[in-house]
Image (tube, rainbow, N blue to C red):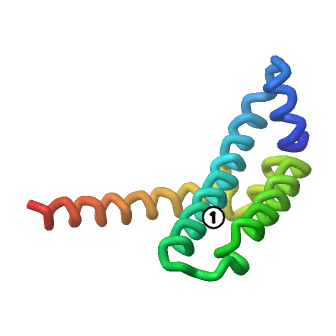
Amino acid sequence: MRTLGQIIEDARSGERPDYDELRLAVCVMDILMTFDRQAIWKLAEGEHKGKKPILVWSSLWQRDENFTRVKGAMAKDPKSYLGPNQDPDSPAVQERRRMSIAIMDGVVRRAQEKKQ
């Protein structure tokens, strides 16, 4: 399988990567966005609480972590980057997702009932 970087480059160049390559690439990009979102929230929390800019509270540290994370992801094929615990083709992963969604639906429903 091709690397995430190759798949993205082909898509941006007007090529038509394989459906499964794109599907797995979207899953990887979702994970990378989650890491970025967590980093931004951590920086905002640090700024709000007046934390000293060290490690996770440092924009320089977060920048370097992002660079390393994206560089690593771009050099791997999406299936190996996802690994067995995040492989959307795994029945165990899908069962875990169904359970997580059901739990979150219950939490949201209870929160809405409390508001009424």
Q: Residue at x 19, y 59 (%)?
A: 112
Compared across the picture, whether 34 is left or right of 13 comes to left
Q: Nearer the viewer, residue 89 or 68?
A: 68
Where residue 8 appears, as percent x and y from the top left, is: 81, 34
Q: Say few, some or many: other residues with alpha carbon within 10 Å of mark 1 (under 14 / 14 to 19 / 20 or more).
A: many
Where residue 53 appears, as percent x and y from the top left, is: 67, 77
Compared across the picture, whether 14 is left or right of 31 comes to right
Mark 1 residue type: Ala
Query: Visible in this render: residue 34?
Result: yes
Q: Residue at x 74, y 56 (%)?
A: 82
Q: Residue at x 53, y 63 (%)?
A: 96
State which quadrant residue 104 falls in: bottom left
Q: Nearer the viewer, residue 26 or 69?
A: 69
Q: Residue at x 68, y 41 (%)?
A: 26
Residue found farthest to the top: 14
Disc tally is 1
Residue found farthest to the left: 116
For label 1, the residue is: 39
Where residue 64 appears, as percent x and y from the top left, is: 81, 64
Query: Visible in this render: residue 91?
Result: no
- Does residue 6 lie above or below 53 as drawn? above
Where residue 32 appears, as percent x and y from the top left, is: 69, 54
Could you tell me which secondary element the residue under label 1 belongs to? helix
